[in-house]
Image: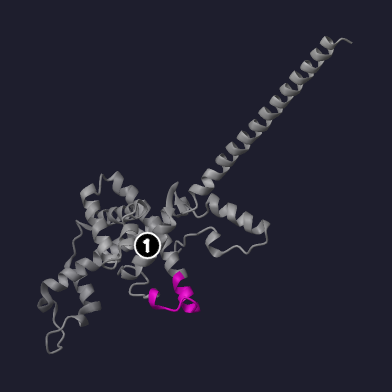
Amino acid sequence: MSRRETGQRVRNRTVRVRSKTRQTLLVVLALVVLVALLAVIIGTPIVRSRDVAFFVDGTPIFQEYVSAMMTDLPFDISSNFYNARVELANPSDPKTQYLRAGLQREAVQRLVIMVAQSRKATDQMIIVTPSALDAAVDNYVKDHAAPGDLAEAQRLHSSVMRSYIQLRELSKAYENELTKNTTISPAEIKEYYDTWGWNYTDKAGRRLTIEEAGKKLVDDALANKKFHLILDDRAQLLKSEAHLMDGDTRYKQFMRWWNIMFGIPVPDELQPLTVDTGS
């Protein structure tokens, strides 16, 4: 075989090797791209739901909403935990843990209700203007952040907390609209007086009559009627909307699987949340 033929064969072999190498690299690159694409497709919902506590009709309710509501309920006269001071209790005390579990249950209930109320508010053309929301955020920060605590003030001004405060404001606006035309009859005033009349006394401690209690008694009886109208409406909304609540997320599902695969105990916060309708 001549040198020329030998050289040609070597060149042909080199071309084939390079071609095969190029094809292999393309296949590997395609596999890497495919794996990366699958990771994005599978991982994106997991990452996006990391800070989500649950969904209501597809609306994400963030963990920060639940934490904020648990903070707010002890200052809400309509809450079962009104005046509870969890922050002063011993975190390791079983009573404190039981209290926090109850607060979380009520926080989930209230958030499900508030989403339903916000939807009804939208249907009734009830809105919270940007300026009203700005004022509500400023008031919320003033009530919840200590003077000079810039880090907490910044957190409360975040987009997530702003959306939580907007939900609160829509809920209030809906309930104000629900009760704005409420009236009270003389019979209802007397019924209220028969129950709470002991609370109306003069300076000497003598119980006042209905006539003597006057406008304050009427105002209190009307406020009490509105209060119970709101509670009844909340209970109905919770029962009618509870089926729209999805207490699991892709992140929780993935982490439960991960922990089980590696023999790690699954913490309570990774379990699906449920809503108690009280029925």
Q: Residues within 10 Å of mark 1 (few under 14, many from 20)?
A: some
The quarter of the rendered structure image containing the N terminus is top right
Residue drawn 19% across and 64% down? 184
Kindly identify which residue carries mark 1: 68
Residue 66 vs residue 148, the one in the foreground = 148
Find out whether residue 54 is within the magenta segment: no
Residue 22 vs residue 266, the one in the foreground = 22
Q: Is residue 129 visible?
A: no
Taking the image as shown, residue 1 lies to the left or right of residue 33, namely right
Taking the image as shown, residue 76 lies to the left or right of residue 213, namely right
Colour treatment of the image: one colour
**Amino acid of disc 1:** Ala
Q: Is residue 108 visible?
A: yes
Instruction: Please tell me whether residue 193 is drawn above or below residue 249 in the rendered image.
Output: below
Q: Where on the picture, by quarter, is residue 31? A: top right
Main SS of the magenta part reads helix
Taking the image as shown, residue 214 lies to the left or right of residue 257, namely left
Instruction: Please tell me whether residue 237 is drawn above or below residue 44 in the rendered image.
Output: below
Find out whether residue 93 is within the magenta segment: yes
Residue drawn 54% across and 52% down? 251
Residue drawn 18% across and 65% down? 185
- Residue 70, image x, y percentages: 39, 66
- Identify the element where label 1 is drawn: helix
Tally of numbered discs: 1
Residue drawn 25% across and 52% down? 133
Which residues are the magenta region?
Answer: 87-100
